[in-house]
Image (tube, helix red, strand yellow):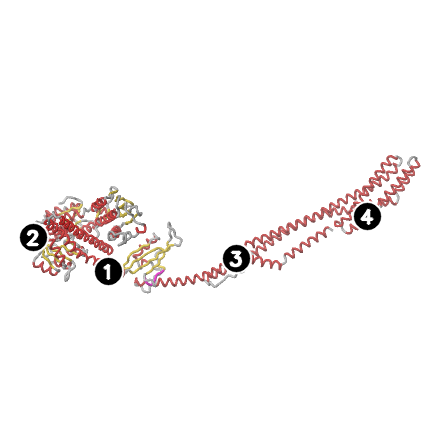
C-alpha cells in the first residue's frame, strides 16, 4: 500500500516537470529570454536556473524521501504497537487459560481460589482492552493491503464476543461453586469436575482458538515491520537518488544553458567581428552589422553601425578637407616642404619646385639637404627645440632671395616639459620683392634725410656764425646801461640758442633715422675693440652728468669689481647707455637712478634702474618698436623721436646680446641689456694697443714732423649749393684761410690745374662730375695727388672715399669746430695720405688695424712676417710702421730699417711695448 502512494506522488511530480521542460516551451522561453535580456542577466538567469533546478531537485528529493520515510516510520511504529497489543492479548488469553486451569487444584483452598480467580478477572480485562485495540487496527487501512485488512476483519468477525462468553461462562461457574461452598470433599470434587468440564467445553476451546489465530495475525504485523524497514531504506535511497539526479540534471542544464548563452553572446560578436574585418580589409563602409538582440551586444552592434556611418561621413569630410587643403597648399605662393624626423621629404607643393627650378621632379623620398642644404641647420635646431620657430634668409639664385621658416611637427598631447617631434615643416617665402621694397624704403628714408642735411647745414652753420658775430662784434658795441637794450640782447641770444638747439635736435633725429636705415640695410660700419666695462660706464655717465644736477637726482653705481672685457663698438655701446640713462632721467622726477653691471652666465649684464613713472604691462612690448612711445599722444607730449630704444636694440643684438625692460606702473623701470663675453676674441685683442691712441700718435707724429709755414693757406671749396659755399667761406675766412670756390667737379679740376690749392673741401653730390669721380681724378694725377681732400656729403660712404685716397670724410650737417680742427691737422701735415705699414703674424690683428686706419684716411699696407716687412718698407717707404714688438725684436727691424737701410726718419709703433722708437 505504501509503495502505491509513493509511486503516485512521484508520477505527479514528474508530470509537472515534463510539462515545465517541454521542448517547445524551452525554445519559446529561450528565444524571448536571450533576445530581451542583457548579457549579465542572461548569465545570471542561467546560473539561477541551474541553481534553481539543483535546489528544486534537492528539496524535492528531500521532501519525497522524508515523506516516504515518515510513512515507513509510521507504518513501522503502528506495526510495532499493534504487534505489542496482540502479544499482550495473546499473553492475557494464555494467562486466563492457565489461571483457569489452576482453579481446579486450588478449589481445595478457597482463599487461593478467590485469589486465582481475581487474576483471571484481571487478565480478562486486559483481553477486553486488547480486543478494543484490535478493532482500532481497522482504522489504519492506509498502511495495510486489502488481503491483510480482510484477514484482520475475518479474525475480528470470527472471535468477536468469544472472550465475553468465556468470561460469562467462567463467571457463572465460579459463582455457582462459590454458592455451593467448598466445605466438603464432595463439593470440592464436584467443583473440580465442573471446572474440568469447563476447560474442555466449546467456549473454552473457542477461547483457545483466539490465541492460535492471533499468532497468524502477529506474523502479519511482523511482516509489516519488516516491510516498513524496507520502505524506510527505499525512501532514503529514493531521496538520495532524486538529489543526485537533480544535481546531474542541473549540471547538464548548466552546460546546455552555457552553450546557449555562449552562442547567444558569441554569435552576434562573431558577426560583428566578421563585418569589422570586411570593413577593414575592403574599406567598404556600406556594410552593416545585423542587430538580433537588445542586450549590450545589440547596443554594441548599433554603435558599431553608427561608427561605420560616422567614419564614412568623416572620410567624406576628410576627403573634401584634404582636397581643400591640397588645393590651398598647391596654390600657396610660398614654397612648402614637409620632412620626417630624418629630414626626408614626405610632401611638398608646386611653389617650391618652381622656386628651386625643378619643374616636374618628384621630390618625395629625397633628403632636404639635396635641395636646400642651407636649411639643414634649421631642421636640426627645430628637432632639438621643437617648440621654437627658426628662420633664415636664403639666396635661391642670383636674383631671388627667400626666407625659410622651420618648425617641428609635434604630437597632439604636448606639455611644456616634453614634446615629441615627428618631423619638420619648412615654409619658404620669396622675399625678393620685399627686399626691393625695403631697399626702396631705406633709400627713400636716406634720400629724404640726406636732402634735409644740406639746408640744415646752412641753418645750423649760419646760425652759429650769426651767434659768433653777434657775441664778438655787435653786442659789445651796444650800450649795456639801457635796460631795453639788455632785454633785447638776451632775447636775441635766446632765440639764436633755440635755433641752434632745434637744428641740433633735428640733426639727431636725422642721424637716428639714418642709423636705423643703415642697420636694417647692413651698411653701418662697426668697430671691433676690447672694451673695459668700468671705462664704458664712466664715459657714458660723464657725458650726461649735467642732467643729474639739473633734475636733482641721485646717481648710484653698482659695478662688480674686475669685470672682464667685452669685444664690440665702444662708441655704439656708449650711445646705448647714454640713451637708456637719458630716458631714465627724462621720466624720473624725484628719487634716484642706479647703474649696475654684473657678470651672469658668461654675459655682462648692465641695468639702468629708475624710480620714475614706470611702464604699463601692455606698453612694455612696444617700447622697442620704431616710432612707438609710451603714453597717450593726445594728452602726453611725446618726448623724443621714438627711435632711441629701437636703435639700442639693433646695437645690442648686433653684439650678440639681448635687451629687455622690467617695470611696474608707478614704481619705476629697469632697462637692462646683456653682452656675451668672447674669451677667445679678447685674447686676440690683448696684443693690440688702443687703436684710438695709435691713430692719435700717428696724427701727432704727422703734425710734429712737418714744418709750419707762415704763408696764408688756400682752401678750395667745391659744392654746387651756393649757401654751403658761402657758409664755408665765412667760417674759413674767420680762421684766416684764403678761400676759392668751385660750383662742380669740372670747375674744381680746372681751378686746381690753374692754381694748386693747399686743401680741398669736396661735396659728393654735384652735377656733371660727382665728388667721388672728382677725387679719383685728383688722386690719380701725380702732380695733384698729395693735396689733402676733405669730403663733405649727406651720404655715409666713408669706405668708398677712403678707397679713392681722400684724407677725411665728414657728413652734413657739418660740425664747424671739428672741421676746423681737421683742416688744421691736414694743413700741418703738408701732404696727403700718409702710408702706414702694418706688420703682424695674426690675420685678425692685421684686419682690425687696417680697417681702423683706413677709416682715418691712411693708406695701409700689410705684411705678415719680418722679411716681408723689410721688403715692403724698402719698396714703398711708408711714413710709419706698426709692428708686433716680439716680431720686431726677432728680426731687429728698427735697427735694420733705420740704420742699415737708410730709413732714418721712419716712425715705429710697437704693439706690446709702450715706448716709441
**Disc 1 marks which residue?**
440
Residue 147 shows up from this direction: yes
Q: Quadrant of residue 364?
A: bottom left
Instruction: Answer few, some or many: residues within 10 Å of disc 4's Cα (few below 14, many 20 plus, some between 14 and 19).
Output: some
Instruction: Answer few, some or many: residues within 10 Å of disc 3's Cα (few below 14, many 20 plus, some between 14 and 19).
Output: many
On residue 156, the disc is: 4
Q: Secondary structure at mark 2?
A: loop
Instruction: Please name the residue shown 11% across and 60% down the image.
Output: 747
Badges 2 and 3: C-beta atoms under 8 Å apart? no
**Disc 3 marks which residue?**
297
Q: Which one is in front, 7 or 429?
A: 429
Q: Point out the tag, 2 or 3, that comes first from the N-terminus.
A: 3
Residue 444 placement (x, y as % from top left):
22, 59
Badges 1 and 4: C-beta atoms under 8 Å apart? no
Q: CA distance from mark 1 to mark 2?
A: 47 Å
Q: Secondary structure at mark 1?
A: helix
Q: CA distance from mark 1 to mark 3?
A: 73 Å
Q: Point out the tag, 4 or 3, that comes first from the N-terminus.
A: 4
Residue 860 placement (x, y as % from top left):
16, 52
**Disc 2 marks which residue?**
712
Q: Nearer the viewer, mark 1 or mark 4?
A: 1
The quarter in which the C terminus is drawn is top left
Q: Secondary structure at mark 3?
A: helix
Q: Is residue 348 magenta?
A: yes
Residue 62 placement (x, y as % from top left):
66, 49
Residue 862 shows up from this direction: no
Q: Point out the tag, 2 or 4, that comes first from the N-terminus.
A: 4
Q: Which residues are magenta?
A: 347-352
Q: Residue furthest left?
A: 711
Amino acid at each position: 500500500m505504501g509503495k502505491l502512494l509513493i509511486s503516485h506522488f512521484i508520477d505527479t511530480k514528474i508530470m509537472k516537470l515534463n510539462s515545465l521542460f517541454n521542448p517547445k516551451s524551452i525554445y519559446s522561453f529561450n528565444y524571448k529570454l536571450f533576445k530581451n535580456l542583457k548579457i549579465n542577466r542572461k548569465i545570471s538567469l542561467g546560473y539561477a536556473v541551474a541553481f534553481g533546478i539543483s535546489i528544486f531537485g534537492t528539496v524535492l528529493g528531500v521532501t519525497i524521501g522524508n515523506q516516504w520515510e515518515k510513512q515507513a516510520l509510521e507504518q513501522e511504529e503502528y506495526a510495532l504497537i499493534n504487534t505489542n497489543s496482540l502479544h499482550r492479548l495473546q499473553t492475557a488469553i494464555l494467562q486466563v487459560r492457565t489461571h483457569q486451569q489452576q482453579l481446579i487444584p486450588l478449589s481445595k483452598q478457597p482463599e487461593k481460589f478467590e485469589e486465582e480467580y481475581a487474576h483471571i478477572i484481571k487478565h480478562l480485562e486486559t483481553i477486553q482492552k486488547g480486543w478494543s485495540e484490535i478493532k482500532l487496527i481497522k482504522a489504519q487501512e492506509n498502511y495495510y493491503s486489502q488481503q491483510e485488512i480482510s484477514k484482520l476483519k475475518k479474525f475480528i468477525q470470527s472471535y468477536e464476543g468469544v472472550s465475553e462468553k468465556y468470561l460469562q461462562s467462567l463467571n457463572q461457574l465460579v459463582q455457582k461453586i462459590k454458592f455451593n461452598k467448598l466445605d466438603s470433599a464432595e463439593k470440592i470434587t464436584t467443583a473440580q469436575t465442573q471446572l474440568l468440564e469447563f476447560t474442555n467445553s466449546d467456549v473454552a476451546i473457542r477461547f483457545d482458538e483466539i490465541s492460535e489465530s492471533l499468532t497468524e495475525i502477529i506474523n502479519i504485523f511482523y511482516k509489516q515491520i519488516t516491510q516498513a524497514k524496507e520502505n524506510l531504506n527505499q525512501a532514503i535511497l529514493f531521496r538520495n537518488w532524486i538529489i543526485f539526479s537533480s544535481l546531474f540534471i542541473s549540471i547538464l542544464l548548466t552546460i546546455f544553458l552555457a552553450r546557449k548563452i555562449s552562442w547567444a553572446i558569441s554569435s552576434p560578436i562573431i558577426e560583428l567581428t566578421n563585418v569589422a574585418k570586411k570593413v577593414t580589409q575592403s574599406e567598404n563602409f556600406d556594410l552593416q552589422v545585423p542587430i538580433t538582440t537588445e542586450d549590450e551586444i545589440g547596443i554594441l552592434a548599433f554603435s558599431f553601425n553608427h561608427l561605420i556611418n560616422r567614419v564614412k561621413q568623416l572620410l567624406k569630410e576628410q576627403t573634401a578637407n584634404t582636397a581643400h587643403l591640397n588645393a590651398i597648399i598647391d596654390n600657396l605662393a610660398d614654397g612648402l616642404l614637409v620632412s620626417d624626423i630624418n629630414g626626408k621629404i614626405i610632401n611638398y607643393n608646386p611653389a617650391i619646385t618652381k622656386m628651386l627650378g625643378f619643374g616636374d621632379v618628384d621630390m618625395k623620398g629625397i633628403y632636404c639637404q639635396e635641395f636646400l642644404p642651407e636649411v639643414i641647420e634649421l631642421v636640426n635646431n627645430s628637432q632639438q627645440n621643437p617648440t621654437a620657430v627658426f628662420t633664415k634668409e636664403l639666396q635661391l639664385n642670383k636674383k631671388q632671395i627667400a626666407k625659410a621658416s622651420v618648425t617641428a611637427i609635434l604630437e597632439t598631447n604636448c606639455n611644456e616639459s616634453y614634446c615629441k617631434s615627428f618631423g619638420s615643416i619648412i615654409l619658404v617665402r620669396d622675399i625678393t620683392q620685399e627686399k626691393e621694397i625695403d631697399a626702396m624704403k631705406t633709400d627713400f628714408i636716406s634720400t629724404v634725410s640726406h636732402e634735409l642735411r644740406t639746408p640744415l647745414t646752412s641753418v645750423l652753420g649760419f646760425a652759429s656764425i650769426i651767434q659768433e658775430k653777434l657775441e664778438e662784434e655787435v653786442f659789445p658795441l651796444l650800450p649795456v646801461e639801457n635796460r631795453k637794450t639788455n632785454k633785447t640782447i638776451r632775447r636775441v641770444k635766446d632765440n639764436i640758442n633755440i635755433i641752434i638747439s632745434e637744428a641740433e635736435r633735428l640733426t639727431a633725429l636725422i642721424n637716428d633715422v639714418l642709423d636705423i636705415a643703415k642697420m636694417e640695410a647692413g651698411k653701418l660700419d662697426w668697430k671691433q675693440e676690447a672694451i673695459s666695462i668700468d671705462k664704458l660706464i664712466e664715459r657714458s655717465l660723464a657725458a650726461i652728468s649735467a642732467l643729474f644736477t639739473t633734475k636733482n637726482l641721485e646717481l648710484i653705481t653698482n659695478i662688480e669689481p674686475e669685470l672682464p672685457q667685452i669685444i664690440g663698438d665702444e662708441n655704439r655701446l656708449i650711445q646705448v647707455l647714454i640713451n637708456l640713462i637719458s630716458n631714465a632721467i627724462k621720466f624720473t622726477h624725484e628719487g634716484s637712478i642706479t647703474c649696475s653691471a654684473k657678470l651672469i652666465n658668461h654675459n655682462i649684464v648692465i641695468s639702468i634702474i629708475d624710480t620714475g613713472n614706470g611702464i604699463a604691462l601692455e606698453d612694455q612690448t612696444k617700447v622697442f618698436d620704431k616710432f612707438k612711445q609710451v603714453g597717450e599722444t593726445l594728452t602726453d607730449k611725446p618726448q623724443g623721436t621714438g627711435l632711441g630704444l629701437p636703435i639700442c636694440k639693433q646695437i645690442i643684438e648686433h653684439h650678440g646680446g639681448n635687451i629687455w625692460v622690467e617695470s611696474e606702473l608707478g614704481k619705476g623701470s629697469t632697462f637692462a641689456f646683456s653682452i656675451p663675453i668672447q674669451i677667445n676674441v679678447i685674447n686676440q685683442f690683448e696684443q693690440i694697443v688702443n687703436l684710438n691712441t695709435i691713430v692719435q700718435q700717428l696724427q701727432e707724429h704727422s703734425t710734429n714732423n712737418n714744418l709750419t709755414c707762415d704763408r696764408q693757406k688756400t682752401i678750395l671749396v667745391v659744392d654746387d649749393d651756393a649757401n654751403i659755399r658761402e657758409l664755408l667761406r665765412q667760417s674759413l675766412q674767420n680762421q684766416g684761410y684764403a678761400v676759392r670756390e668751385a660750383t662742380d667737379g669740372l670747375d674744381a679740376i680746372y681751378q686746381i690745374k690753374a692754381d694748386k690749392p693747399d686743401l680741398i673741401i669736396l661735396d659728393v653730390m654735384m652735377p656733371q662730375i660727382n665728388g667721388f669721380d672728382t677725387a679719383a681724378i685728383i688722386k690719380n694725377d701725380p702732380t695733384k695727388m698729395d693735396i689733402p681732400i676733405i669730403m663733405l656729403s649727406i651720404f655715409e660712404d666713408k669706405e668708398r672715399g677712403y678707397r679713392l685716397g681722400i684724407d677725411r670724410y665728414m657728413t652734413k650737417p657739418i660740425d664747424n669746430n671739428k672741421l676746423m680742427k681737421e683742416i688744421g691737422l691736414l694743413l700741418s701735415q703738408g701732404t696727403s695720405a700718409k702710408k702706414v705699414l702694418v706688420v703682424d703674424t695674426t690675420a685678425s690683428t692685421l684686419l682690425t688695424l687696417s680697417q681702423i686706419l683706413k677709416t682715418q684716411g691712411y693708406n695701409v699696407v700689410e705684411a705678415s712676417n719680418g722679411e716681408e716687412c723689410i721688403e715692403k718698407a724698402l719698396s714703398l717707404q711708408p711714413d710709419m710702421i706698426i709692428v708686433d714688438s716680439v716680431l720686431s725684436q726677432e728680426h731687429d727691424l728698427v735697427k735694420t730699417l733705420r740704420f742699415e737701410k737708410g730709413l732714418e726718419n721712419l716712425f715705429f709703433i710697437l704693439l706690446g711695448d709702450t715706448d716709441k722708437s
